[in-house]
Amino acid sequence: MVQDLKAIGDQLKKRRTELNLSLKEAENATSIRQNHLQSIEEGNMDKLISPVYAQGFVKQYAAFLGLDGEKIIRDHVEIFNKTSFRFSPEKYYDIGSLEIRGNPGSGVKWMPNIAWGIAFLAVLAFGWYLAKFFEIL
């Protein structure tokens, strides 16, 4: 199985070098992190988050390179079994999905809201004044 992983990685790496593409270019085109692409090319699928991600990444990367990702997955089903991965969730706490990050621009913007409120009240008061002036009310 390790040889199969390495064979898939070698095939993808060979195709990428034939197309004269860097890992960074592949990352930009596929939105798959460079370290994940490198893990796939090295045959270290257990460094990926899960078997589902591994399948998706291999399919997407292969399609980007002009290869049939579906066929690669079908030909190597045993590699993408859940039992073949040594998934450890502890090493993925840094991906940002488990913690709330503070974003300086994400709160309620009080100053613009107050300004719009004052402008609305001013227009309302001006309308009331005009209605009184022209004796509409």
Image (spheres, rainbow, N blue to C red):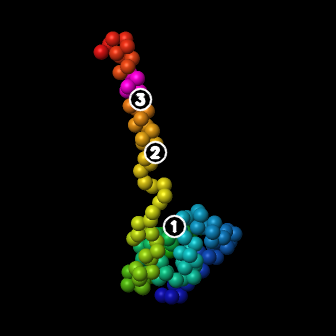
The range drawn in magenta is: 122-127
What type of secondary structure mainly makes up the magenta span?
A: helix
Q: Is residue 20 left or right of residue 118?
A: right
Q: Reply above or below: 12 against 109.
A: below
Q: Reply above or below: 28 against 94.
A: above
> What's the residue type where badge 3 is placed?
Ala
Mark 2 or 3, nearer chain start: 2
Q: Reply above or below: 137 against 10.
A: above
Between residues 135 and 15, which one lies in front from this camera angle?
135
Whether residue 25 is visible:
yes
Residue at which label 2 appears:
111
At x 56%, y 75%, the residue is 35
Whether residue 81 is visible:
no
Mark 3 or 1, nearer chain start: 1
* Image spot of residue 126 (x, y percent): 40, 23
Residue at which label 1 appears:
60
- 123 falls in the magenta region: yes
| Disc 2 and disc 1 in contact, CB within 8 angstroms | no
Q: Residues within 10 Å of mark 3 (few under 14, many from 20)?
A: few
What's the CA distance linking mark 3 and mark 1?
A: 57 Å
Badge 1 marks a residue whose secondary structure is helix
At x 38%, y 25%, the residue is 125
Q: Residue furthest bottom?
A: 2
Badge 3 marks a residue whose secondary structure is helix
Q: Nearer the viewer, mark 3 or mark 1?
A: 3
| Disc 3 and disc 1 in contact, CB within 8 angstroms | no
Residue at which label 3 appears:
122
> What's the residue type where badge 1 is placed?
Gln
Between residues 41 and 70, which one lies in front from this camera angle?
41
* Image spot of residue 89 (x, y percent): 40, 79
> What's the residue type where badge 2 is placed?
Met
At x 38%, y 19%, the residue is 129
